[in-house]
Image (spheres, helix red, strand yellow):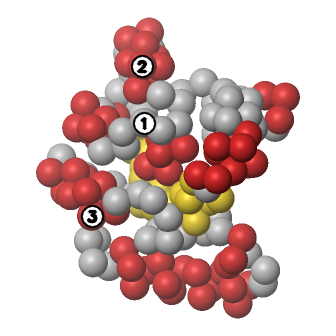
Amino acid sequence: MYFTKDEYPGGNNLASTPRVWREMFKRVPCEFLGLNYDPSHLRLLMADYVKPVYEFKDKIFHVHFKDIQIHKDKLDEHGAFSYPALWHSPKLPGLGMVDFGAFCSALNDIRYNGPACIEVEDRAFEGSLADVKRGIEQSYRFMSQWV
C-alpha cells in the first residue's frame, strides 16, 4: 500500500479492500493468487480487519504483524480524505490500535499456518540497527502470547 501524495488513496496497490479482493479473485481464478494480509492496512481504511480473515481464509498466503496508531486530533484536523501520513503512524505490534488477540484468534480459527513476519515499521525503532533489533525482540515477546 505504498503511495505518494498524488497517488492517494489507492497508490499502486489495487488489492486494497475486501470488495476489490472478491472481484480480483473472480476475474483471476488462480490458486496461486493470494493475499499478503496486514491488519494495519484495513485499520488505516477504518475497516474491519478480523471478519475478512474468515471470508478469504483460502487466499491468505502471508501475514504481516504490524500495528498502526491513528491520531484522532490530526484526523479531525486534516480529515480522512487527506494524505494519511498526516494522521497515522505505523507501529510495532501491540503499540497501536490493532487487537492482535482477536486477529490471531481468527487466524487460529481458520487454521492458518503459513508464513508471517513482524514488519518493523515504527519510527521509534528505525534509527539504527540496534533499534531495529530491539523492535524485533519487543515484537517477538508481544506476539508470543498468541503465536
- In the rendered view, tell whether residue 77 sits above or below residue 102: above
Q: Amino acid at mark 2?
A: Arg
- In the rendered view, tell whether residue 35 sits above or below residue 136: above
Residue drawn at (25%, 31%), measured in percent from left and top? 55
Provide the residue designation for mark 3.
101
Q: Earlier in the sequence, mark 1 or mark 3?
A: 1
Question: Label for residue 60?
Answer: none
Q: Residue 128: which quarter of the image?
A: bottom right
Check disc 3 and report its element: helix, strand or loop: helix
Q: Residues within 10 Å of mark 3 (few under 14, many from 20)?
A: some
- In the rendered view, tell whether residue 31 sits above or below residue 105: above
Q: Are marks 3 and 2 in contact (CB under 8 Å)?
A: no
Instruction: Look at discs 2 and 1 and give the one toward the viewer.
Output: 1
Residue drawn at (30%, 55%), measured in percent from left and top? 103
Question: Label for residue 47?
Answer: 1
Say whether residue 97 is left or right of residue 48.
right
Residue furthest left as drawn = 109
Residue drawn at (40%, 84%), measured in percent from left and top? 141
For this rendering, which residue is in front, 80 or 90? 80
Figure quadrant of the C terminus: bottom left
Q: Earlier in the sequence, mark 2 or mark 1?
A: 2
Check disc 2 and report its element: helix, strand or loop: helix
